[in-house]
C-alpha cells in the first residue's frame, strides 16, 4: 500500500496551469509544478490523515519526485496517453521498493485538481475512479500548490 501512495503522489504532479481545463490532449504541460495530496484510497479504504499529511509531488519534464514522511523520496518517469474513454498514465519508479517496475493508471485533470487510479505492478489498468478491497489499486487526489 505504501507503494501505491508514492505512485499516487507522482501522478498528482502531472497537473499544470498551462493546460486548458478538461483538455483532451495529454501533452503533460498542465502537470508541471508542485502538488499536495488532499485525499485518496487504497484497496477500497480511505487513506487516513496520517497517510495524507506531508504528501508532496513535483513534476517536471516528464519526471516526478514524490516525498512522503513515512516512506521518503521516490523518483521516476511517466508516460501519458488516451483512449476514446479515458486518459491513461504509466509510471515507472527509478528508486524505492518498486524500482524499475511500471504501474498502469488512468487520470482526470480538472483545473487545479488531479485525480488518478493505479494498478499494482503487473496489474490490469483500472477502468473506473474507485478501488475495491484486495484489488491492489490506489487512488489519489492532488491539489496544485505554489512554491
Image (cartoon, helix red, strand yellow):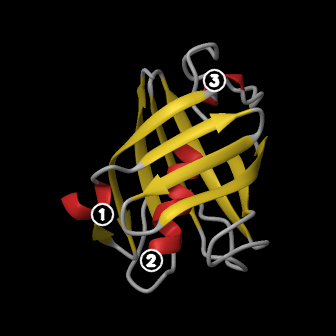
Q: Which residue is mark 1?
A: 51
Mark toward the viewer: 3 or 1: 1
Task: Tell me which residue sits at (67%, 76%) in the image.
Answer: 98
- Which one is earlier in the sequence, the residue at label 1 or at label 2? 2
Q: Which residue is mark 3?
A: 30
Question: Which image quarter is the C terminus in?
Answer: top left
Instruction: State the residue in front, 3 or 140.
Output: 3
For mark 3, does the 10 Å Cα neighbourhood hold few (<14), some (14 to 19), or many (20 or more) residues? Answer: many
Residue 70, percent from left and from top? 37, 68
- Which one is earlier in the sequence, the residue at label 2 or at label 3? 2
Residue 54 in sight: yes
Q: CA distance from mark 2 to mark 3?
A: 27 Å
Q: Residue furthest bottom?
A: 134
Instruction: State the residue in front, 40 or 77.
Output: 77
Identify the image quadrant of residue 94: bottom right
Is 61 placed left or right of 52 in the picture? right
- Which one is earlier in the sequence, the residue at label 3 or at label 1? 3
User: Vertical placement of 129 versus 24: above or below?
Assistant: below
Question: Which image quarter is the N terminus in?
Answer: bottom left
Q: CA distance from mark 1 to mark 2?
A: 10 Å
Amino acid at each position: 500500500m505504501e507503494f501505491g501512495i508514492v505512485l499516487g503522489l507522482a501522478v498528482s504532479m502531472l497537473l499544470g496551469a498551462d493546460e486548458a481545463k478538461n483538455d483532451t490532449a495529454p501533452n503533460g504541460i498542465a502537470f508541471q509544478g508542485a502538488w499536495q495530496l488532499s485525499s485518496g484510497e487504497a484497496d477500497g479504504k480511505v487513506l487516513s490523515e496520517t497517510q495524507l499529511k506531508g504528501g508532496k509531488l513535483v513534476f517536471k519534464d516528464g519526471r516526478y519526485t514524490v516525498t512522503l514522511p513515512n516512506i521518503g523520496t521516490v523518483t521516476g518517469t511517466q508516460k501519458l496517453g488516451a483512449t476514446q474513454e479515458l486518459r491513461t498514465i504509466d509510471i515507472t519508479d527509478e528508486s524505492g521498493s518498486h524500482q524499475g517496475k511500471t504501474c498502469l493508471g488512468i487520470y482526470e485533470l480538472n483545473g487545479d485538481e488531479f485525480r488518478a487510479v493505479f494498478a499494482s505492478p503487473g496489474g490490469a489498468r483500472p477502468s473506473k475512479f474507485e478501488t475495491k478491497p484486495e484489488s491492489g489499486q490506489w487512488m489519489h487526489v492532488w491539489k496544485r500548490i505554489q512554491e
